[in-house]
């Protein structure tokens, strides 16, 4: 079966279970293409609503929850934040994103069990499903040649979130191609192939129209270039251009 059809079937099964049993059901962590498939379905037709969350506002990898209309109890997403840090700062190597992720995957944990991973001050912070978090904490003892400790944070708010670089510039319009060109450089023409080839996502939805207009706080991900958040229009110039501020994910 085609991968896309498999994903859609799995989502429909989770939605049906939520509706039939009046419980909340959850996916694993979803990448942008899977999130696009989620957004393409009107889940109201299944008697449920779908909600996405990845632990913080700009999360790229997110978990979906299917909520029945008759829900009467509190619930939470079944994932936690795990902090991974060197046992000795003095003798630790410089550890990067790829190093942390590789060490985790080498334990046999698949990528869909993990959310975003951020590195700060040689420490790694990663969202992980609750059911594998304790295994991760007990089994992960080394990243590269550095001895590490992994522990579950008391709250997902312990996740530091991404660094953002503020960028200001002027654009003729808030068109998607213009904004991407402003953030990553290049011409609007050079950006079009990214859009036409399905590599651009706005708030988790694949956008294939370069004329799509951005709104305040839209999050744009471009495969191969990076991610940014559109802030706002600061003012309009006398020549009719828009002075805008955006925040590029670092």
Image (tube, rainbow, N blue to C red):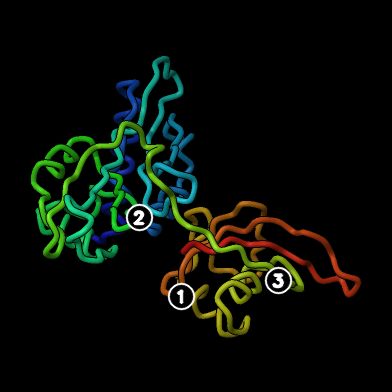
Q: Where is residue 63 in the image (x, y as percent from the top left)?
A: 35, 43
Cβ–Cβ under 8 Å for marks 3 and 2:
no
Disc nearer the start of the sequence (1/2): 2
Could you say whether the residue bearing mark 1 is in a helix, strand or loop?
loop
Residue placed under numbered mark 2 in the picture = 118
Residue placed under numbered mark 1 in the picture = 197
Q: Position of residue 70 (x, y in %)?
A: 44, 18
Count neighbours of disc 1 (C-alpha within 10 A) and say few if under 14, some if 14 to 19, many if 20 or more.
few
Q: In this view, does 99 lie above or below 38?
A: below
* Front: mark 3 or 1: 3
- Residue shown at 49%/56% (left/top)? 205
Could you say whether the residue bearing mark 3 is in a helix, strand or loop?
strand
Q: Position of residue 29 (x, y in %)?
A: 31, 47
Residue situated in front as seen by the camera: 160 or 78? 160
Q: Point out which mark residue 169 bears.
A: 3
The image quadrant where one finds the N terminus is: bottom left
- Residue shown at 16%/46% (left/top)? 149
- Residue shown at 19%/40% (left/top)? 133
The number of callouts visible is 3
Could you say whether the residue bearing mark 2 is in a helix, strand or loop?
strand
Disc nearer the start of the sequence (3/2): 2
Q: Is residue 60 above or below residue 151?
A: below
Count neighbours of disc 3 (C-alpha within 10 A) and say few if under 14, some if 14 to 19, many if 20 or more.
some
Count neighbours of disc 2 (C-alpha within 10 A) and say few if under 14, some if 14 to 19, many if 20 or more.
many
Among the 4 quarters of the image, the one containing residue 104: bottom left
Disc nearer the start of the sequence (3/1): 3
Q: Where is residue 241 in the image (x, y as percent from the top left)?
A: 81, 71
Among the 4 quarters of the image, the one containing residue 218: bottom right
Q: How far apart are marks 3 and 2 (CA)?
A: 28 Å
Residue situated in front as seen by the camera: 66 or 247? 247
Q: Left or right of 59: which side holds 95? A: left
Q: How far apart are marks 1 and 2 (CA)?
A: 28 Å
């Amino acid at each position: 079966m085609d991968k896309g059809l498999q994903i859609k079937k799995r989502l429909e099964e989770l939605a049906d279970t939520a509706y039939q049993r009046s419980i909340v059901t959850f996916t694993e962590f979803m990448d942008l293409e899977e999130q696009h498939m989620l957004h393409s379905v009107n889940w109201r037709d299944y008697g449920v609503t779908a909600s996405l969350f990845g632990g913080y506002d700009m999360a790229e990898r997110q978990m979906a929850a299917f909520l029945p209309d008759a829900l009467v109890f509190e619930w939470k997403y079944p994932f936690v934040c795990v902090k991974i840090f060197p046992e000795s700062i003095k003798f630790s190597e410089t550890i990067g994103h790829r190093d942390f992720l590789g060490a985790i995957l080498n334990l046999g944990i698949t990528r869909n069990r993990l959310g975003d991973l951020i590195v700060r001050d040689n420490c790694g912070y990663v969202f992980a499903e609750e059911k594998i978090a304790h295994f991760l904490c007990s089994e992960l003892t080394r990243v590269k040649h550095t001895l590490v400790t992994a522990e579950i944070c008391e709250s997902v708010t312990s996740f530091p979130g991404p660094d953002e670089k503020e960028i200001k510039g002027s654009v003729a319009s808030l068109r998607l191609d213009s904004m991407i060109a402003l953030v990553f450089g290049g011409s609007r023409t050079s950006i079009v192939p990214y859009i036409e080839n399905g590599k651009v996502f706005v708030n988790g939805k694949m956008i294939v129209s370069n004329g799509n207009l951005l709104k305040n706080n839209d999050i744009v991900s471009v495969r191969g270039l990076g991610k940014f958040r559109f802030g706002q229009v600061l003012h309009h110039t006398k020549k009719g251009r828009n002075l805008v501020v955006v925040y590029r994910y670092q």
